[in-house]
Amino acid sequence: MSALLWLFDTVVQIYLIFLIASIVLSWLIAFNVANPYNQFVYTIRDFLARVTEPALQPIRRILPDLGGIDLSPMVLIIGIIFVQRLVHEAFRSFAYGM
């Protein structure tokens, strides 16, 4: 059972890295540090968008429009960490019978 918990944690951590990379890349593009027309940047941006946008879109529909500020990644990160902790608590109560 701990192998499944390890796998779950690893997948969550990789997804969080993708989400943070997507945030950083969007900032680099917004401040004209990275050229979105560069093939390498476009490929990375496209991959990160395909991975993160399905989870961000429902949150963006719920959150109010704050102009240029997008809080959906922060809400998603908090939600993912919350679910991860819930899974750990459930595993502890299942494994140790508390």
Image (tube, rainbow, N blue to C red):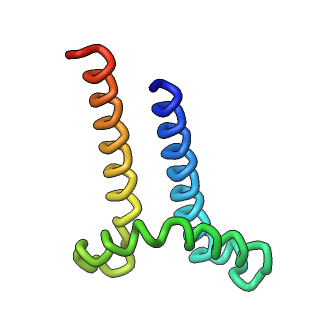
The residue drawn where x is 53% and y is 45% is 11
Q: For the N terminus, which image quadrant?
A: top left
Above or below 19: residue 84 = above
The residue drawn where x is 29% and y is 14% is 96
Give the total number of marks visible in the rendering.
Answer: 0
Q: Is residue 73 left or right of residue 22?
A: left
Image x and y of residue 93, in percent: 25, 22
Q: Which residue is more in the foreground, 18 or 1?
A: 1
Image x and y of residue 41, in percent: 73, 73
Among the 4 quarters of the image, the one containing residue 89: top left
Q: Is residue 16 left or right of residue 21?
A: left
Q: For the C terminus, which image quadrant?
A: top left
Q: Is residue 47 left or right of residue 52?
A: right
Q: Which residue is more in the foreground, 75 or 4?
A: 4
Image x and y of residue 26, in percent: 56, 71
The residue drawn where x is 37% and y is 72% is 69
Q: Which residue is more in the foreground, 17 or 90?
A: 90
Image x and y of residue 91, in percent: 33, 27
The residue drawn where x is 23% and y is 73% is 62
Residue furthest to the right: 39
Among the 4 quarters of the image, the one containing residue 73: bottom left
